[in-house]
Image (cartoon, grey):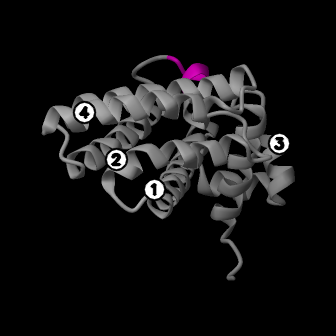
Amino acid sequence: MPALSKRDQIVSKALELFYQHGFNATGIDKIISEAGVSKKTLYNHFKSKDELILATLRKRDELFRNNIMRETEKLGTTAKERLLTIFDAHDTWFNSKKFSGCMFINASAEFSEQQNPIHMLCTEHKRLIRNYLKELAEQANVLDPDLLAQQLNLLLEGAIVEAHVSSNKQGAKLAKSIAITLVSNAMNEAH
């Protein structure tokens, strides 16, 4: 495997530190030290900490969505199954050793102003997850794919918060039990 570029090395280490400790609590000096780069190198790649945060969130979005979609599609063979196996993919994530909640929920809480570019990127990530659910719902031929996507997304978001805030690692399984009814009702309405 090729060595990471300095930029990728910084983003990778910053992503790990931000996810584990938070954005405001993680200083640039800690990132520089952990990434093994100089301050000059960091600032050659990123004009500000906010620019670095945006880069880490873009990377996290790419990694997270690719992983969740891959796991969902591996676990389910039909669109209907995948509307439910996405909860199984989340269950695996919740029960992983490195689970620290949703990086996008955490970032949007720390950068709560709606027009902040960081908050806007978090909003975009959540929209892309809903779009994936809507695509699955459309493929499953439900009557109102947008409504089902919103409902399932709300369950996923609640499960994420429950798993992180309340340390209830069964959040995805509980949400899936509700999702089964929602998907079944949506399929019946279509026929």
Check if mark 4's residue and mark 1's residue have beta carbons within 8 Å: no
Give the labeled residue for mark 4.
Answer: 186
Q: Residue at x 61, y 24 (%)?
A: 161
Horizontal and vertical percent position of residue 45: 60, 56
Instruction: Give percent across and percent down for residue 136.
Output: 30, 49
Whole-angstrom CA distance, mark 4 to mark 2, is 17 Å
Amino acid tagged 1: Met
Kindly identify the amino acid type of the residue bearing the numbered disc 3: Asp
Which residue in the protein does label 3 denote?
Answer: 29
The first of marks 4 and 1 along the sequence is 1
Question: Between tags 4 and 2, which lies in front?
Answer: 4
Closer to the observer: label 1 or label 3?
1
Residue shown at 13% from the left, 39% from the top: 191
Q: Is residue 49 above or below residue 107?
A: below
> Regarding mark 4 in the picture, which secondary structure is present there?
helix
Which numbered disc, 2 or 3, marks the residue that appears first in the sequence? Answer: 3
Question: Mark 1–mark 2 contact, CB under 8 Å?
Answer: yes
